[in-house]
Every structure is written in structure tokens, then in C-alpha cells.
Image (cartoon, rainbow, N blue to C red):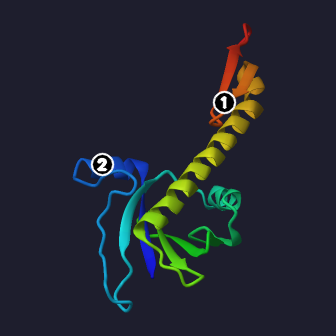
Amino acid sequence: MSVTLVLLPIALAAAAAAGGVGAIGAATMAKSDTSSAPAPSLRVRTRMKDSTLLARALTNLGASDITVSATRVTAEVDGVLLTMTLTDDDVWEAHVESTDGHTVTEATAADLLQRLDGEYAAMVQQAVAEKIRSRADSSGFDLVSETREADDTVTMVLNVRAEA
């Protein structure tokens, strides 16, 4: 059995929430009792946009056989094949299929995507922090301190130079 997830961009998901679509895991599910029928589908909010950061997030989750293009990402992770395809509407669609014969449920697929979303958020944070570090001096700022919390939250203190 496999599960297909439609990953709604956060902004689109927020607009849809007003119309009845809920948070991560809340979904319109089409369940099937027969193996020849379409896989259940699930709508999930996400912040994922960049396929390169997505591949790095998958690596952090222990994925193997990662293949990346601008509109498609595939990887084996946790005994499943994850195939993510960017639709014409710029919405990622993820299909999760068992590689070891075990059943993939909506809950396990949603859990995988939540973990992937968390890793992706960490990759975005690292990229933004690096941009701040590299551009601070040329933008008239001094990086006074940088701390990382137990949950990997990064706090940077910047001072504006007097001559700026």
C-alpha cells in the first residue's frame, strides 16, 4: 500500500484553513479497501520550496538513493520510497510507497513528512544565518554574538556601526 500527500505551501495552507483545510495531518483522505484503487491522499502544510535544501534535509534523515531535479525528488528512507513531484501549481506532491512489503499508513506518511519539514526548516535556518554572517560587515553591522539553543534555535546579536 502507498500514500500520496499534497504538500501545500504555508501561505496557501493558511488561506485554505479559512475554507476548512486544517494543519499538518488534517486532510481530505480517499481511503480504499482494494489494492487496485488509487492510494489514499493527504493534504499537508509545508514550507518546502528548494529541492537542494530538501535533498540535504533527506540526507539528515538518513535517506539513501537521493535523486534531485528542479521538479522531482526521490529517496529511500525508513523502508519507504518517497517521491516528491512539483506540480504545475508549484505545490509539492509526495508519494510514499513501501519498499519492504509493509503497509504505509497515512499516519506513518504524515510523520515522515513532518520530520522532513522539520529538517528542511533547520536547513533554511542555517542558510539564512550564513547569509547574515556573510553580509553583516558589508551592510554596516557587526556580529556581536551568536548562540544556539538546545532546540537548534539560533540567536544573533548585531550592532549597527556608528559610521553606517
User: Most extreme residue toward the front, as rendered?
Assistant: 102
The residue at which mark 2 appears reads as 15
Q: Is residue 58 left or right of residue 114?
A: right
Q: In which quadrant of the rendered view does residue 80 lie?
A: bottom right
Disc 1 marks which amino acid?
Glu
User: Most extreme residue toward the left, as rendered?
Assistant: 19
Q: From the image, which quarter does the N terminus lie in?
A: bottom left
Q: Residue at x 31, y 82 (%)?
A: 32
Q: Residue at x 23, y 53 (%)?
A: 20
Disc 2 marks which amino acid?
Ala
Q: From the image, which quarter does the C terminus lie in?
A: top right
Whole-percent x and y of residue 66? 69, 71
| Rendered view: 140 above or below 103 | above
Q: In which quadrant of the rendered view does residue 106 lie?
A: bottom left
State yes or no: discs 1 and 2 in contact (Cβ < 8 Å): no
Rounded to the nearest whole Å, what is the CA distance between mark 1 and mark 2? Answer: 32 Å
| Rendered view: 88 above or below 153 | below
Viewer-side residue, 65 vs 98: 98
